[in-house]
Image (tube, rainbow, N blue to C red):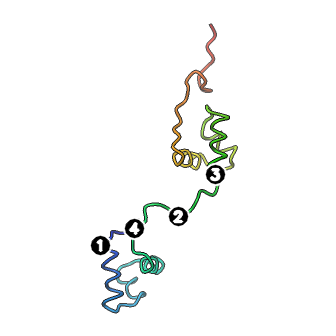
Amino acid sequence: MTYSADFRAQVLKSVKQQGMSIRQACAFYDISKATLQNWLKDPSIKLTRNKPPSKIPDEALLKDVEQYPDDYMYERAQRFGCSKSGIEAALKRLGISQKKDLSASKSLPIKKS
């Protein structure tokens, strides 16, 4: 949960100007000590994580999508040893949507003329 900028400012004002200790402020405002210490270092609201993807490398996923364009997410997840939702998040991060070609779908029976 992200706290509002007004709330952060009020907590920091209590600690810096009113002489409230970190422990007292945490108890009064019902926030963790780590949260308050992070705010004291940098009170800005962060919208993204500062951590690169660790489980699924971008290059390997792009190569897999190129090699197997019609595979389901659970099949990619088996190849990468991760969850289907992890593959979904990685594809979204790369801006790839899974629009399948219905003629190549594995769920439809093969039509014979």
Q: Which residue is mark 1?
A: 6
Q: Which mark is residue 56?
A: 3
Expressed as whole percent of the image width and height from the top left, the position of residue 93 reads 52, 49
Give the Cα separation between the discs numbered 2 and 1. Answer: 24 Å
Q: Which residue is mark 2?
A: 50
**Residue 47 vs residue 106: left or right?**
left
Q: Residue at x 42, y 87 (%)?
A: 22
Q: Which mark is residue 45?
A: 4
Precedes in sequence: disc 2 or disc 3: 2
**Quadrant of the rendering where the N terminus is positioned:** bottom left
Crowdedness of circle 4 by 10 Å Cα count: few (<14), some, many (20+)? few
Crowdedness of circle 1 by 10 Å Cα count: few (<14), some, many (20+)? few
Q: Residue furthest bottom?
A: 19
Q: Is residue 86 above or below residue 26?
A: above
Precedes in sequence: disc 1 or disc 3: 1
Q: Residue at x 61, y 24 (%)?
A: 104
Q: Is residue 87 above or below residue 14?
A: above
Expressed as whole percent of the image width and height from the top left, the position of residue 97 reads 51, 38
Q: Nearer the viewer, residue 10 or 43?
A: 43
Precedes in sequence: disc 1 or disc 4: 1
Count of numbered tags: 4
Precedes in sequence: disc 2 or disc 4: 4
Precedes in sequence: disc 4 or disc 3: 4
Of circles 2 and 1, the one toward us is 2
Of helix, strand and loop, which one carries label 4?
loop
